Image (cartoon, coloured by chain):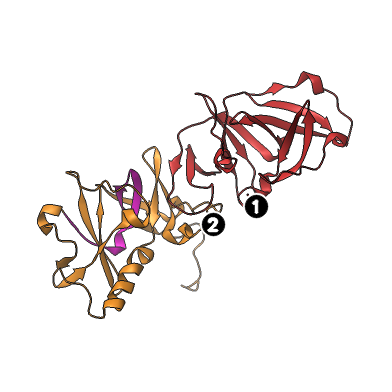
Chain colours: A orange, B red
């Protein structure tokens, strides 16, 4: 049998993905673990907006503002999530971090087609979480503004 | 969770249509029963940040997540009652739900000859029928979200 031929009777490999589940503005959101660079507590950052970690600047992104969600980050459980994708980096403040969730690709639900606005670019799908759902955020979209800002300033931001 | 309209229990083969008559904000509307896939108690919806008009939430029913079309908001109305109902309909893009008044929907069978053109512009309709002084529009489910 050719080794390249698929073996019958053996399930094809399933691909799993890991997500960081957070709360922001009372909504569950999921961030792909592949884009995570770190988690900070506000006290560690000295309340500086743009974080510099290992010489790399993670510009502050107001995700609540971009999603028109209530700005409820400021409690004891507030965390700063550092994100990166290719050359783009940014940090977002979230109300609570719930933890990592590993899921099969089949467990990721598509956003219903009735959502036809720009939000189709904001989310990559949905996950059943607790008795609710968590929306999987599109990291590329989150960091896009950051890239635009950096390109606009020419030199980038500094903490 | 349905009542039958006893006044309209007549039927002519191939010339009748079955409608489900329900209320939103006290306004009576109808929908073809073929477009309906279920009615249940309304559970809390989960808001989704987005910019699609009147589609701003989902509901979770077990392992299924369905988009919510806010029919009341599209009609500038507010649903009535403390025990609201969830009307699940078949939309070309997939099933979706609407929150309707707590008043129990009623099944009616109509002769097609009583169905007339609906001239209102407030909702997509396949026609309407007259009940006393009221004109009851028959909702075009397939056009919800595209023309309102």
Residue under label 2? A116
What residue range appears in magenta? A18-40
Q: Residue at x 18, y 61 (%)?
A: A49
Q: Residue at x 34, y 68 (%)?
A: A145
Point out which mark residue B147 bears: 1
Q: Is residue A8 left or right of residue A38?
A: right
Subunit that carries the residue with mark 2? A
From this view, report whether residue A60 is shown above or below residue A70: below
Residue A138 x %, y % = 39, 61
Q: Residue at x 42, y 59 (%)?
A: A122
Q: Residues within 10 Å of mark 2 (few under 14, many from 20)?
A: some
The Cα atoms of the two marked residues, 1 and 2, are separated by 13 Å
Residue B37 x %, y % = 64, 37
Query: Which element is circle 1 on?
Result: loop
The residue lying toward the viewer, choosing from A33 and B28, is: B28
From this view, report whether residue A142 is shown above or below residue A29: below
Q: How many marks?
A: 2
From this view, report whether residue B138 is shown above or below residue A1: above
Label 1 close to label 2 by CB (< 8 Å): no
Residue A35 x %, y % = 30, 64
Kindly report which numbered mark, 1 or 2, lies closer to the viewer in this rendering. 1
Query: Which element is circle 2 on?
Result: loop
């Amino acid at each position: 049998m050719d080794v390249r031929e698929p073996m019958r009777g053996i399930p094809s490999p399933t691909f799993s993905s890991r997500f960081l589940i957070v709360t922001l503005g009372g909504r569950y959101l999921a961030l792909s673990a592949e884009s995570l660079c770190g988690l900070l507590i506000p006290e560690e950052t000295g309340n500086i907006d743009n974080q510099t970690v290992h010489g790399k600047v993670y510009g502050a992104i107001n995700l609540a503002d971009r999603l028109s969600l209530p700005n409820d980050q400021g409690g004891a459980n507030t965390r700063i999530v550092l994100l990166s994708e290719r050359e783009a980096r940014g940090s977002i403040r979230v109300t609570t971090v719930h933890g990592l969730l590993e899921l099969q690709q089949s467990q990721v639900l598509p956003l219903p087609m009735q959502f036809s606005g720009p939000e189709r670019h904001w989310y990559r799908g949905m996950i059943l979480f607790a008795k609710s759902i968590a929306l999987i955020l599109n990291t590329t979209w989150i960091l896009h503004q950051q890239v635009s800002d950096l390109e606009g300033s020419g030199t980038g931001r500094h903490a | 969770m349905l009542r039958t309209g006893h006044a309209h229990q007549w039927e002519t083969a191939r010339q009748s249509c079955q409608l489900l008559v329900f209320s939103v904000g006290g306004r009576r509307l109808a929908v073809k029963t073929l477009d309906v896939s279920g009615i249940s108690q309304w559970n809390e919806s989960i808001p989704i940040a987005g910019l699609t008009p009147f589609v701003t939430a989902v509901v979770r029913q077990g392992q299924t997540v369905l988009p919510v079309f806010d029919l009341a908001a599209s009609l500038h109305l507010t649903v009535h009652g403390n025990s609201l109902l969830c009307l699940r309909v078949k939309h070309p893009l997939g099933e979706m739900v609407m929150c309707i008044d707590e008043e129990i929907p009623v099944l009616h069978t109509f002769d097609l000859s009583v169905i007339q053109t609906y001239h209102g512009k407030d909702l997509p309709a396949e026609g309407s029928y007259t009940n006393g002084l009221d004109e009851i529009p028959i909702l075009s489910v397939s056009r919800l979200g595209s023309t309102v």
